[in-house]
Image (cartoon, rainbow, N blue to C red):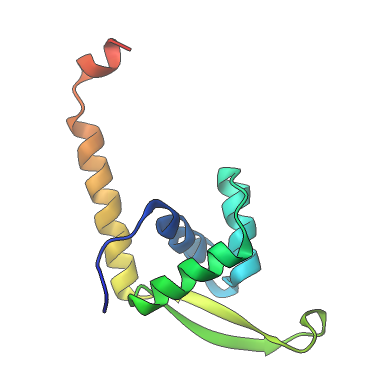
Amino acid sequence: MKGTYIGEFQELVMLAVGVLYDDAYGVAIQEEIKKQTGRKVTLSTVHAALNRLEDKGFLTSRLGGATEERGGRPKRLFRITAYGRQTLEKSRSMRNRLWQLIPKVAWDQM
């Protein structure tokens, strides 16, 4: 497995995969990110992140059933792996620790 760190966008993609659970495919992930963050992202950016995350072992994918609306092409569905969950939990824990370390006085002076 390559690398153990994820960037902010990769984290958003993984979180969207978790939110969508059994219906996590490119377009749905793109729409979930926009819905939750207001960020407009391109489908190619989402696919690039999904591929990198799968290469690192944070996600797995499988082909779903083909649909008429997709011209008979199957959807590539993603799920978070145990390693991916562990990575997300470490990321959240690190952020929470850093937030707690900011002295109150730093906020009071703003």
Residue 46 vertical position relative to residue 81 in the rendered view, above or below:
above
Q: Is residue 67 left or right of residue 11?
A: right
Query: Residue 3 at x, y = what percent?
Result: 25, 69
| Residue name at image x 62 percent, y 59 percent | 42
Quarter holding the C terminus is: top left
The answer to which quarter of the image holds residue 58 is bottom left
Residue at 29% over, 73% down: 83
For image coordinates 65% across by 66% down, the residue present is: 27
Instruction: Tell me which residue sits at (28%, 63%) in the image.
Output: 87
Can residue 102 be seen here? The reply is: yes
Residue 50 located left or right of residue 32 = left
Visible in this render: residue 80?
no
Quadrant containing the N terminus is bottom left
In the image, residue 22 sits, relative to residue 8, either above or below, namely below
Tell me where residue 53 appears, x and y as whole percent: 40, 71
Q: Residue 89, percent across and down? A: 29, 58
Q: Position of residue 82 (x, y in %)?
A: 31, 74
3 or 68, nearer to the observer = 3
58 is higher (above) or lower (below) than 70: above
Q: Quadrant of residue 9?
A: bottom left
- How many tags in the picture? 0
Q: Nearer the viewer, residue 100 or 74?
A: 74
Answer with left or right where residue 54 lies relative to residue 106.
right
Query: Is residue 38 shown left or right of residue 81?
Result: right
